[in-house]
Amino acid sequence: MANGAEIVAKYLEEEGVEYVFGLCGHTILALLDALAYKTKIKFITCRHEQIAAHAADGYFRVTHKPGIVLVHVGPGMTNAITGVANAALDSSAMVVIAGDVPSFHFGQDPHQEIKLHLDGGQYEIYRPFVKRAWRVHDVKFISDIMARAVNIATSGRPGAVLVDVPMDIFSKPCDRSTENLTRRKVTGKRIAGDASEIDKAIRMLQAAKNPILYLGGGVILSDASQEATRLAEYFGIPVATTLMGKGAIPEDHPLSIGMTGFWGTPLANEMTKQADLLLAIGTRFPETDSSSWLPQYTFAIPPTKLIHVDIDPHEIGDVFPTEIGIIGDAKAVMQSMLECAKSNYSKKDWVKDPVVDKISKSKEAWLREIEKYQTSDAVPIRPERLLKVVREVLPRDGIIVTDVGWNKNGVGQQFPIYHPRTHLTPGGLATMGFGPAAAIGAKIGAPDKVVIALVGDGAYGSVPSVVATAVENDLAIIWVVMNNSAFAVIRGLQKGAFGRVACTEFRKVKTGEEYNINYAMLAKAYGAEGYRVENPKDLKPILEKAVASNKPTILDVVLDPNVFVPTTGHWDIKDIYAGEI
Ligand SMILES: Cc1ncc(C[n+]2csc(CCOP(=O)(O)OP(=O)(O)O)c2C)c(N)n1
Ligand SMILES: [Mg+2]
């Protein structure tokens, strides 16, 4: 007879799970044993549960298979929260399995129980961000709950779920059969949109003078890039994206105008603002992509008319009034839109359309503005130069993982992405620490692709042990650390609003002297390769060498700390600091 842990392990294996990310604790030993000795599943030991959750998130983003996280009660569960909430907000499918204190000791202060408001109630702290949190009360329900957990995490708008298992339940024998554990699987996930609304939408699109197709992360989640490109090409519609939507259409496509918002491209902000019709697919119009929703910067809705397609009804009409709001899967809806277009209208000969010329001229003008920095030989190195070199070395289908800071904002604006699922970034929660850790899951999910994590020194310093997991598992990840001895993006906002600096730079407190960490030496201490780069001319050969070596490597790049990503949109926090709104 199998016990609870063996049933979970068997279920995961039947479900096709190959990796579980986590960190041990006494409440999960039964499951660790079952995974190791009763299945082929590999447990990826991380040195912190936040890292494990980000790694599972990165794995999902690259493979679209749910990320499975296994953590211990108490500090294990609480450490994982940041990574789970980050995944939840970016709609990554994730199943968190947590060991809990023995069920018959609930309320008795067993080791690591938190019960200030509820006996045995610590799993409740996940409720605000998971789609569902289960507590397994009886071992006979464990297989059903696991199947429902995977269904909920992976269906509709993907997200995170929690299965909390008191440790005695892992060890309880269960006489329920372990055959056909996955019989409850959802097998068809494409929710079609309302045909008459799609028909109306296509009529509006055909009649529009200067429409824009606006693609969010939902397009990538739905694997709908081809449909998006075809739809854009059918009507010759320029395409803008959110940060999470980058790569939904190749950014060197003649109709691509880049990312919108605070750190967006000037062209994307200008064209979305002037559009008479916006067809938005799979986006929640987040604040930074929408310039705090102020009409003078990115979106002026109204007068722009909005057609909004999303799988989650909560998003329709949430921030902007909507002409047509369609609930449905991005790929299914765009397929129907294309069919509707083909039966009613002929394809536009968009290649010679003046808008294509306008896009290309504007892109060239923007490039001319940043080119001098991209080719600058200045020491310390300009961040633009580093981004340019990383893009040149990274294959078209290579994966770039970013964090928060110059890396995220700069990549959003100045780093073209050509394929879906090759740009991984913490969109919603904007979590410092995501980039270094998500790269682990990305490389495990796509072992044949080059994976570069472009991250700040603040971010790398918050999760330095990621490299240990890479060395243990032979993961040839390259972390390019943008080392500027500061939480520079926050310091930039601080300087702009307060005119002076406090607590945003890395300095020795007594002397005020700069405190700069050598991450190349840290890499070597962990048994990885490490290079410190101070001269821009060394960047390319060293990065190429790192790619060719196929070993975990840190490139510690000393950067000019006083360069900011140009902002072409708006963020109202400056007005908030000034007490003006
Ligand atoms: C966990 C977490 N804490 C704080 C923040 C606020 N924050 C946003 S960017 C940033 C600075 C990041 O510094 P670094 O990684 O060195 O990148 P840089 O800005 O220097 O390019 C901070 C602290 C955050 N996003 N996440
Ligand atoms: Mg920094």
Image (cartoon, rainbow, N blue to C red):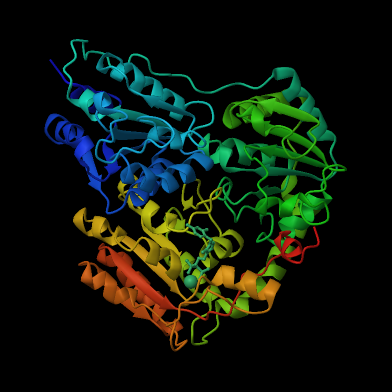
Name which residue lies at 67% across and 32% down. 309
Q: Residue furthest front?
A: 108
Count of numbered badges drawn on the protein: 0
Could you tell me residue 295's position as x and y percent? Answer: 82, 51
Is 92 placed above or below 534 here?
above
Residue 353 visible? The answer is no
Question: Does 478 sit left or right of 491 as displayed?
Answer: left
Q: Residue furthest top?
A: 176
How far across and how far down the image is residue 445, in percent? 34, 44
Kindly indicate the quadrant of the structure image that contains residue 32. Answer: top left
Taking 442 as reference, is 307 above or below it? above
Left or right: where 120 falls relative to 380: left
Which residue is depicted at the point 40% across and 47% down? 58
Q: Quadrant of residue 577?
A: bottom right
Image quadrant occupied by the N terminus: top left
Out of 531 and 488, give the one closest to the viewer.
488
Q: Nearer the viewer, residue 37 or 234?
A: 37
Q: Is residue 66 left or right of residue 37?
A: right
Q: Is residue 11 left or right of residue 87?
A: left
Q: Closer to the camera, 64 or 111?
A: 111
Residue in view at x 25 percent, y 63 percent: 551
Task: Please say if 81 is above or below 577.
Answer: above
Q: Could you say where residue 543 lies in the image, as x and y percent from the top left? A: 37, 71
On the rendered image, what quadrant is the C terminus found in?
A: bottom right
